[in-house]
Every structure is written in structure tokens, then in C-alpha cells.
Image (cartoon, grey):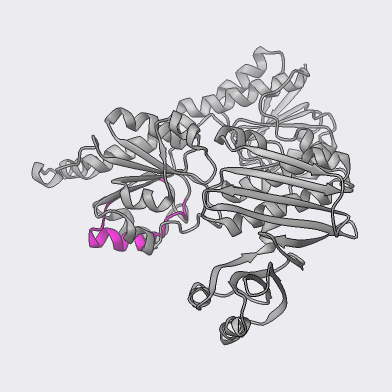
Amino acid sequence: MERVLISDKLDPACAEYLTEHGFVADQQVGLSPDALKAAAAGAVGWIVRSGTTITPELIEAASSLRVIGRAGVGVDNINLQSATRRGVVVINAPEGNTISTAEHACALILALARRVSAAHQSMREGAWDRKQFVGTELFGKTLGIIGVGRVGRGVAERMRAFGMNVIGFDPVVSPDVAKDSGVELVTLEDVVERSDVITLHVPLTKTTAGLFDAQRLAACKPGVLLVNCARGGLIDESALLDALKSGHVGGAALDVYAQEPPGDGLADLVAHPNVVCTPHIAASTAEAQQKVAVQVTEQVVRGLRGEPVATPVNASAIRLSSRPEVRPFVALAEMLGRLVTRLNAPQPIRRVIVEGAGDIPRAAREVLAVGALAGVLGELLDDRVNLVNAEALAQEAGLPVNTEWASAASNYQHYIDVVLDTPEGTRSIRGTLFGGEDARIVALDGYELELRPAGTMLFYKNVDRPGMLAAVGAIVAAADVNIGAMALGRKDRGSAALTVMHLDDKLDAHQLARIGELEGVEDVRLVDVESAQKTQN
């Protein structure tokens, strides 16, 4: 019988399912690299969680391998390009822990509102003080959900049963999709200012890191309850402790932390009487572990039998993008998608438009929109977005994607436009390739210019009049930061202009704020372009 290697600890249902369907379940956990290479040899399937990193060398050693299954969402521990080149299908199980995480968030909301943890501890210590633990009813209160994806919508559906009014912010999910779960989409500021309870369900990205800092916590309703079952680092934990001590934040429930396990520096936060803490267990239920194991094993068996699979990670988009004549165009589209999304933040996106023109290979045209979408969603969601799941994630969020093609490209052999349609208008970026692989940005929001996307770049718009460049340059110089290169663009003389500076070092928030305070200067952005040039592994 054919053998499937299981190199991480999974629910017994995984091995049972393989055996029932005529495969040998070879479970070997905690192997050394050499032992793992030997175990992989001859295996036709391989199922892992996050503990095993499947490198190109291991894929090469597994000469009989046809399918890799990841019990969970992320596949960053699997080298997709090596698997694709070998014709190995990679499959994941993205939905197994959705219900468990949503239920845990609801449990923490209830525990905070009714002070369950503190009351429990008081009784364990022999006390009986009913007056000290007067709670808060959730009925009629406003729940704010930041991140209205699968988990966020699951929380909304459950907490509406308690009579809560539910509002939410999500830069991608459409109002119709949110409405189906009873969520009114509003701005991030509205969620912060209107909510009695706020629960976070977003990934940790450059945009969301420190999302709830001292300033945003201060903008919350007095007495707000804050819940985080998503990612550590979304909340400034020091600022949260200060807000709890002052009483502005009424309580916090945390399942995730910036450092795990939390160090001594978080002892005061964990011990605060209005804090409920759990050790990153939101997805840890017996049902979730079993669901993930069964889902991925079912798909692995289907893949080994040559049947269609529901959650392939390296489908045709990745195979096309690995072709030498296609790869530079897809990389350009993805970089443009990431860059324009950063320049658009924090405005939500209602539609993505990808336009191409000129001598772009036909094979590249099939995946350019997917590449741009992977860049946009990868910036807003997380690095688990790839060329395969980008379209599915957009569809799930109700985010429309339109493509347009023209045969000729004026001024250039070809170009790619990525346009974001937002409630405030559109943000657009145009790029091209010089010499086949040298990426250039040639227009931003209709301003024509030419610049190489590299390093730290300062973007800002200003009134087109003498002295503006000198005023900004003086602040940059005072920060002891050198300007390596610069590009200017304007539409008409005397109208608004766009300036982009390549900086040798970064400016801090205070220096950026000073630039933004200059009369006639607006929309100041600092972007690390290298981090926007993500490549599929």
C-alpha cells in the first residue's frame, strides 16, 4: 500500500481516515533533518502542521511525493515553488478553527461584561462580595468588530442573539457581505467612538501593528471593553495598561500577546483585576483539531486519487507565474498592488481594477489581475495570501475585480495599472518594465513621473508654488537624512503637485507630522518599498 508521512502531531482521525481509505499512515514526529529526509523518501503524501518545514531539499528527496497537506491555513513552512516544479499538489485546511475562535471571543466578551474571572477568583479565596462584581448587560449595547472576515462574522452572528447592535470595519469586505451577518459597515473611527465592546479579528501587518495605541485607546468610549483573539501586537500593551489604570478602558480580554509566552514586563497587565487572559487557546478545541485533521486528510486522499480538491494552494496561477517570461510581470503587478494599497490606507477598498496594455505575454495576462489582487489583499490581510487563494478571498469578501486590456501603450512598450475604487475616490498606480525586469513606476494618481521603486520613499502632495520643496527638504535635512533621488509630477502649472523622495534612512512619526503640518502639504506617506516586493516562496 502507498504510504503517507505525518510528521507533526495531529488528531488520530487523520491516521484513521488514511487507513480506512487504503493508505499506510506513517506518523513520525520530532525527527532530525536527516531522519526526516529518510522518512520522506518513498512517501506519496505528506501531512504537516506548522512544526515541519518542508524545504526544497526535502521535496527533492521525496521522489514519490504527489501531495502535501497542511493542517491549517498558512503554508509559509512549505516551499511552494519547489513543490510546483515537482508537480506536487499543496493543500491546506483554512476553515477548521473558525467556529472555535469565534466562540472563544464571545466567551471573553461575556466574561468581561459579567466579571466572571474576578468573581471566581474572589470565591476561591473564601470571599462572598456580591456588590464588588456588579456586571454590565450586553443587551442594547454596541459591539464593534474590526475585521469582518469569517471569524468576525461568526462573532457577529452569535452576539446578535444577545441583543447587541453590531457595527464593523473592514477595508475589503463589501457592505452586502457584512449585512448578511447583521453587521453595519462603518469607518474605523466610528467603530472606535461608538462601540461599548470592541473585538479584533485582523491579521498582524504593517498597517495593523499597534492599531490600538495610546491615541486610539483615548478615542474609545469611556469604559470600553476590548477583546483580542487575533494576533499579538495589534494592541500597545503598555498603553492598554495605562488606560486600564486610569479607568478609561473598563476591561480587556486577551488570548494573544506581542511576545508569547508573555514576559515579566506584562506581569502587571496580566494581574490587573479588569483583565481576563488565556494562553492563545482560541482555536484549541477538540472539535477544531479534529476538523482540521479530517479536512486536510480528505483532500490529500482525493489528490492522491487524482480527484479534484477543494483547497489547492499551488494551482494554475502559481504554475503560470513560475514561467520566466511571466514572472517579472506578475511580480510587478503584485508590487504595484501592495504599494497603492499602502498609499491608500486606511481607506476601505470597494473595487480593484487592473488595466494592462502593450506587449505583455498572453500567459501573463491570465494572472496579472491575480498578482495585483495578491498584492492588495496581502497588504490588508497577511502574507498567507497567494496567487491561488487571492481570488477566492476577494470573492468571499464581496470585493469586485475588473480587468481591462488595450493593444497599445503610449510612451511605453507596455504598462500595468492598478486602480483602487474607494469611498473617497480612486487611487491608482502605473508601472512598466525596462529591459525585461527593471521595474519602474511611471504614474501615481494621474501624475506622470518616473522612478525606480526601491528603499525608503517619501510621498506627498503639495501646492505647486516656489519654496515647497525647500520647506520639506529642510525638515528632512534637520533629521540628518539624505535625499538620494527625487521625482516630481504635476498635471497643470500652479495646480497640486506630487513629490517622491528616495531617502537613505527613515523619518520618525514626529518628523512626518512636521512635514504634514506645512501649509500646502498633504497626504504624507513613508513607504519601505523592499517590503512591498513580496515574492511567492
Residue 285 visible to the viewer: no
From this view, report whether residue 433 is shown above or below residue 199: below
* Residue at 80% from the left image edge and 42% from the top image edge: 405
Q: Residue 241, position in %: x, y? A: 32, 60
- 85 and 122: which is toward the camera: 85
Q: Residue 118, position in %: x, y? A: 22, 45
Asked whether 233 falls inside the magenta stretch, the response is yes
- 123 and 419: which is toward the camera: 419
From this view, report whether residue 464 is shown above or below residue 384: below
From this view, report whether residue 97 is shown above or below residue 367: above
* Quadrant including the N terminus: top right
- 444 and 182: which is toward the camera: 444
The residue sitting at the front extreme is 493
* Residue at 41% from the left image edge and 57% from the top image edge: 212
Q: Which quarter of the figure has residue 308?
A: top right
Which stretch did the figure color magenta? 232-255
- 368 and 466: which is toward the camera: 466
Q: How many marks?
A: 0
Residue 504 visible to the viewer: yes
Q: Residue 283, position in %: x, y? A: 47, 35
Asked whether 537 falls inside the magenta stretch, the response is no
Q: Is residue 500 left or right of residue 438?
A: left
* Residue at 69% from the left image edge and 39% from the top image edge: 402
From this view, report whether residue 58 is shown above or below residue 344: above
Q: Is residue 423 left or right of residue 76?
A: left
* Residue at 78% from the left image edge and 40% from the top image edge: 367
Q: Residue 299, position in %: x, y? A: 67, 23
